[in-house]
Amino acid sequence: MSRLRAAAALDVEGALKQVEAAIAQAVDCQEPLLRQMVAELVRAGGKRMRPRIALLAFDACGGGEADLDKVVDAAAAFELIHTASLVHDDIIDQSPLRRGRPTVHVSYGTPHAIVAGDFLFTQGFALSGRLPKEVIRVTAEACVRLAEGEVMEQRLLAEEVDEESYLTIIAKKTAEPIRACAMTGALLAGAPKEVVEALGHYGLEIGIAFQIADDVLDIAGNPAETGKAVGQDAKTGVLTLPVGLNEAGTDPGWDAKTFRSMARQTDPEELRRLLQETGAIDKARGVAQKYSDRAKARLAVLPPGPSKDALVALADSVVKRRS
Ligand code: FPP
Ligand code: MG
């Protein structure tokens, strides 16, 4: 702790506005249709959780004004890469809705959606490319894990998935990029190695909690709040934790294959009732809480300050989230 400078009291909301400006600039291009597609995506917003984590980690590790532009670029890059991966994920998952609007492939067709995603990836990496080598390495590694997680999930769609494989998939497809955001903030603040690692663990664990909360929302969420169709993962056979934890409609255990094939054919309302009755939804929420608590404990390496408090609050909010 003594090797960290005191937190610099960054104006996080102000810095997030700079991130929005960097994103807006990055998605400008000459082709009107492409510009329209990506502008709609960016306008649809999102939680901006990844940029927020990068900025908070930077400030909590004592990052100063001189490096603010770098962390703003990194935060914008992570959001662009994340948005790109969602455009492609929605094609793969055949999802009709995202952030309360028709998905890009529904509005503009799959060929255009593929290219829009590629464009966003490219612009994300154009921003990352200006950053120190270690940040580029961490970002590229997270993207490798993202791709591995997405393909592993699809490869195992019709296979038995044990608890360990389930956790590997969600760590790769969701938590690794969040880990990279937290590490990047710490790296750009010049934090010592053990602090960068601790922040990395925080990101990984908060990311796992976030994805489990997402899994619960797939079953028990309100589309008016989530902006996504309910039961989409269940319908397409993507394993979610409440489904994995449900054992033949009785006591929650792990019996993913049997129940998953049944979940595919079950009406979303009926599935929610069943998983609520068996306690699988509550049990999944409990697992998310466990990861959120672990994430918070990682922050012990940081000196007290508003950004540390905000990182703690963020770990609490991912478990409680309704959207
Ligand atoms: C959402 O999960 C999926 C992701 C966050 C990962 C998508 C990754 C890719 C398409 C691969 C990207 C490739 C590279 C090279 C970076 P979900 O379907 O459970 O969540 P959802 O309910 O929000 O759709
Ligand atoms: Mg999806």
Image: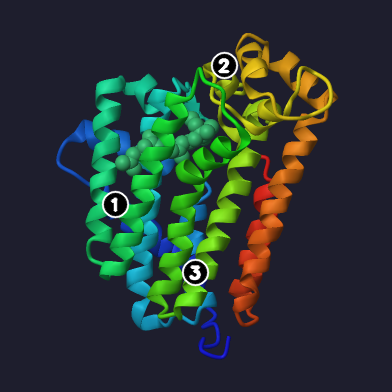
Mark 3 burial class by Cα count in 10 Å: few <14, some 14-19, many 20+: some
Badge nearest the viewer, 3 or 1? 3
Q: Quadrant of ligand 1?
A: top left
In percent of width and height, residue 296 lies at 67, 64
Q: Judging from the image, what secondary structure is the residue with disc 1 in?
A: helix
In percent of width and height, residue 120 lies at 29, 43
Badge nearest the viewer, 2 or 3? 3
Q: Residue furthest bottom?
A: 2
In the displayed structure, 266 sits above or below 12; it is above
**Given the image, on which type of amino acid does mark 1 rest?**
Gly
The reply to whether callout 3 and callout 1 are in contact (CB within 8 Å) is no
Badge nearest the viewer, 2 or 1? 2
The reply to whether callout 2 and callout 3 are in contact (CB within 8 Å) is no
**Badge 3 is on which residue?**
197
Task: Give the residue drawn at x 42%, y 28%.
Answer: 90
Q: Which mark is residue 235?
A: 2
The reply to whether callout 2 and callout 1 are in contact (CB within 8 Å) is no
**Badge 1 is on which residue?**
124
Asked if one can make out residue 199 in the rendered structure from this viewpoint, the answer is yes
Q: Quadrant for residue 51, please give it.
A: bottom left
Q: Judging from the image, what secondary structure is the residue with disc 3 in?
A: helix
**Given the image, on which type of amino acid does mark 3 rest?**
Glu
